[in-house]
Image: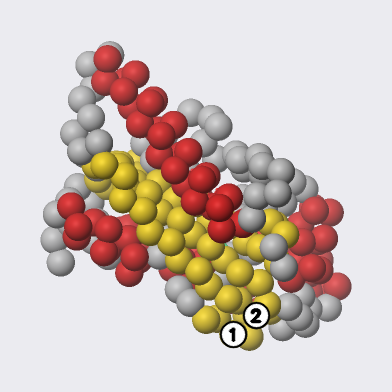
Amino acid sequence: MKYPHIYLASASPRRHELLTQIGVAHEILNVPPPAGEDEPILPGEVPLDYVQRTALHKAEWAAKWLNREANEGRRIVRPLLTADTTVALAHEILGKPSDHDDAITILCKLSGQTHQVYTAVVLLHDRQVHKALSTSDVTFAKLSHQCIEDYVKTGEAFGKAGAYGIQGHAASFIQHLAGSYSGVMGLPLCETAALLSRIA
Ligand SMILES: Cc1cn([C@H]2C[C@H](O)[C@@H](COP(=O)(O)OP(=O)(O)OP(=O)(O)O)O2)c(=O)[nH]c1=O
């Protein structure tokens, strides 16, 4: 499969790894904040709307930044990809943990429950916006408080939606996954490949 060479506007090392896994050549853009920070949730906003709005906002923000850079001599020559991953439990958005206690609280909520992981992907190319969405149902085993404490101590919970990484130690928490493994990890590869082949 031949993909176009793209810009990846993301601070997530997982998105870089996943694109590399399927052979998508990309240049990582280190877009200044608010990239990397959680977008505020609008009153009454449901997770599905939130994740799509956030992914689009990241793309628009990165394009604006790139345009400014372009004025300083850099040309926008590649399609631009962004994504957002949001974890939701019964419609409550569980973002990245703010600290140790927050991580414990989030994981206690997820223990023994099925939650949703949404990843929205946006590709900007030739003034067109291409979008994809992946939805997964993830069921956690019932976790003891000690297990949660030990997990949070590894540091893996931080910087990740829902305070866990499916690709790390938290793999042992997951009883069942209905959906996309790569989508849970941060970039659904099947959907992303389909977006990229649309513009190839
Ligand atoms: C649920 C889950 C999330 N995550 C990560 C993927 C994302 O990096 C992060 C969700 O935060 P995002 O806001 O989607 O992404 P980010 O801030 O890390 O990067 P950027 O906005 O610059 O692209 O959680 C995992 O790595 N594994 C998991 O199992």
**Which dot marks residue 135?**
none
The residue pinned by badge 1 equals 176
Q: In screen coordinates, is 192 left or right of 52? A: left
Q: Quadrant of residue 7?
A: top left
Q: Position of residue 9 (x, y in %)?
A: 39, 41
What x and y, as percent, mark residue 140? 68, 79
Note whether ligand 1 is within 8 Å of mark 1: no
Label pair 1/2, CB-CB below 8 angstroms: yes
Q: Quadrant of the C terminus?
A: bottom left
What secondary structure is found at the residue carrying circle 2?
strand
Q: Residues within 10 Å of mark 1 (few under 14, many from 20)?
A: few
Would residue 145 be visible to someone looking at this image? yes
Q: In percent of the image, x 68 and y 77: which residue is there? A: 114
The correct choice, above or below, for 127 with respect to 173 in the image is: above
The residue carrying mark 2 is 139
Q: Residue extending furthest bottom?
A: 175
Residue at point 48%, 77% (across, down): 179
| Image position of 8 (left or right of 147) | left
Compared with 29, 114 (above or below) is below
Q: Which residue is more in the foreground, 155 or 87? A: 87
Please provide percent x and percent y for residue 64: 38, 26
Q: Earlier in the sequence, mark 1 or mark 2?
A: 2
